[in-house]
Amino acid sequence: MNYTELKEILNTRTVRASAQVDAQTLGGSDRSLLLGCTCSRNVWHVYLKDGRIHRFVYREDKDVRHEARTSWPMEELVPDKRVYPEYSDAAFSRVLEGNGIEVPFARFDDIRYSLARAREAEGVFRAPIKAG
């Protein structure tokens, strides 16, 4: 997402009861939905692939956790430390924030945004960062 999309999402935060998100509702092509990190320094990657939402948490070359479901409680898809908006899907972020899930976005960085768009053009973020 770009900086304007991030500001729009942050300005529409509301508090609601826990909700589910399902892969069919997200639709579209396989893609990265959210990329961030945890307080334990793990990478947190949520992506849509083959009709399922995958949550893949890992450190370096060691898999920590991978789980794929057709439906998830929204709060289980957000890491406890930060999310990089430049590597995250704007529509998915709107769904989370619109349902009261506060996404801990890092400060928007123009250089990181340029790198993310270049990697996206290469197809890097249309599938998981790591196989899994």
Image (cartoon, rainbow, N blue to C red):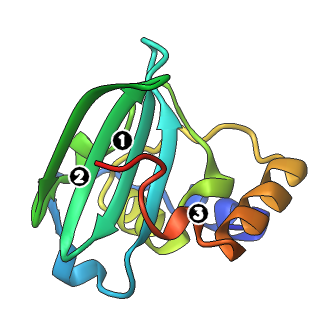
Q: Amino acid at mark 3?
A: Val
**Residue 9 % position (x, y):** 57, 63
Residue 99 higher or lower than 55, as above or below? below
Q: Is 128 displayed left or right of 55 in the figure?
A: right
Q: Are marks 2 and 3 in contact (CB under 8 Å)?
A: no
- What secondary structure is marked by label 2? helix
- The circle drawn on residue 124 is 3
Indicate the quadrant where residue 59 lies: top left
Q: Residue farthest to the right?
A: 111
The alpha-carbon separation of the residues under discs 1 and 3 comes to 21 Å
Q: Which is closer to the viewer, label 1 or label 3? A: 3
**Residue 1 % position (x, y):** 65, 67
Q: Are marks 1 and 2 in contact (CB under 8 Å)?
A: yes
Residue at left offset 23%, top offset 52%: 74
Q: Dot 2: within a 10 Å radius of its alpha carbon, few (fewer than 14), some, or many (20 or more) residues?
A: some
Indicate the quadrant where residue 2 lies: bottom right
Residue identifier under label 2: 74
**Residue 21 % position (x, y):** 19, 65
Q: Nearer the viewer, residue 60 or 88?
A: 60
The count of marks equals 3
- The circle drawn on residue 78 is 1
Residue 18 visible to an observer of this rendering: no
Q: Which is closer to the viewer, label 2 or label 3? A: 3
Q: Is 22 displayed left or right of 43 in the figure?
A: left
Q: Nearer the viewer, residue 31 or 9?
A: 31
- What secondary structure is marked by label 3? helix
Q: Amino acid at mark 2?
A: Met
Q: Dot 3: within a 10 Å radius of its alpha carbon, few (fewer than 14), some, or many (20 or more) residues?
A: some
